[in-house]
Amino acid sequence: MERFGPSGAGTVAVKDMIAVAGCRQTAGIPARAGYSAVEDAAIVKRFRAAGYALAGTTHTDSGGFGTMTPDLPNPIFPARAVGGSSGGSAAAVASGAAEIGLATDTGGSARIPAAYCDLYAFKASAQRVPLQGILPLSPSFDAVGLFARSAQALSAAAKVALDNWQQPAMRPLALDEDALAACNDDVRSAIEARAANLGVADQIRLGVDFEHYSTAHTR
């Protein structure tokens, strides 16, 4: 296993849209099957410097466009899909093959697999983490995403991704009534149960037209 640095901070699985020097960077596109990256992506360099070890590069939906990663079993729920397009990194973390998964997220590509694989996920704000060395899908929406099995591991990885950014004081959490109304009964019950476990009781209304935005990624 290749070491990212001397400190042994953990292992990281890297989505196959993110360049790792000497590894294939195909983005799931057959025409790129023979392509290997010659230089690490900027985000990979940050994890090298922080002492993470490379667990491998991982399968992705073609071009990172979809919300499913085909032909990939879910290690936690074998009868279910892993989601996408960063499903390979999510599966690696869920199975224990890596502690952190490096992903991309344009329209849910990290958050969806996290929900499918019972993981914690983080999507950096647009332009907050450099995208150099990452094959683009929609440059104005693309962002780096992360997976972890615990909030503590995710927080440590997010600090690396954001180059030691210090988190400000947390604002109180609340549920959006409009978002809950857009969910089916099973999803709404699961969200409310998790919110109760986190001590979230307040509900607010943001006035977001979720039905309108749910179609944006398919236009």
Image (cartoon, grey):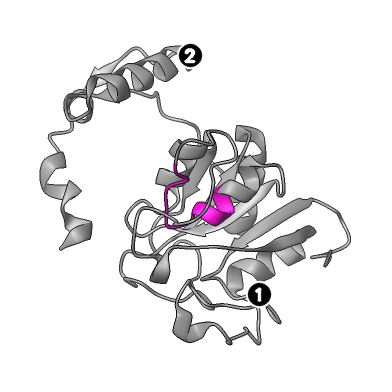
Q: Position of residue 34 (x, y in %)?
A: 58, 87
Helix, strand or loop at label 1? It is loop
Q: Position of residue 157 (x, y in %)?
A: 64, 49
Q: Amino acid at mark 2?
A: Asn
Q: Position of residue 183 (x, y in %)?
A: 22, 28
Residue 179 included in the magenta stretch of the image: no
Quadrant in the rendering for residue 162: bottom right
Magenta: main secondary structure equals loop
Q: Residue at x 52, y 58 (%)?
A: 103
Which region shows up in magenta?
A: 81-90
Q: Residue at x 55, y 62 (%)?
A: 59
User: In the rendered image, which residue does mark 2 sit on?
Assistant: 197
Q: Amino acid at mark 1?
A: Val
Which image quadrant: the N terminus?
bottom right
Is residue 164 visible in this depiction of the protein? no
The label on residue 20 is: 1
Q: Residue at x 38, y 24 (%)?
A: 173
The single residue placed furthest to the right in the displayed view is: 6
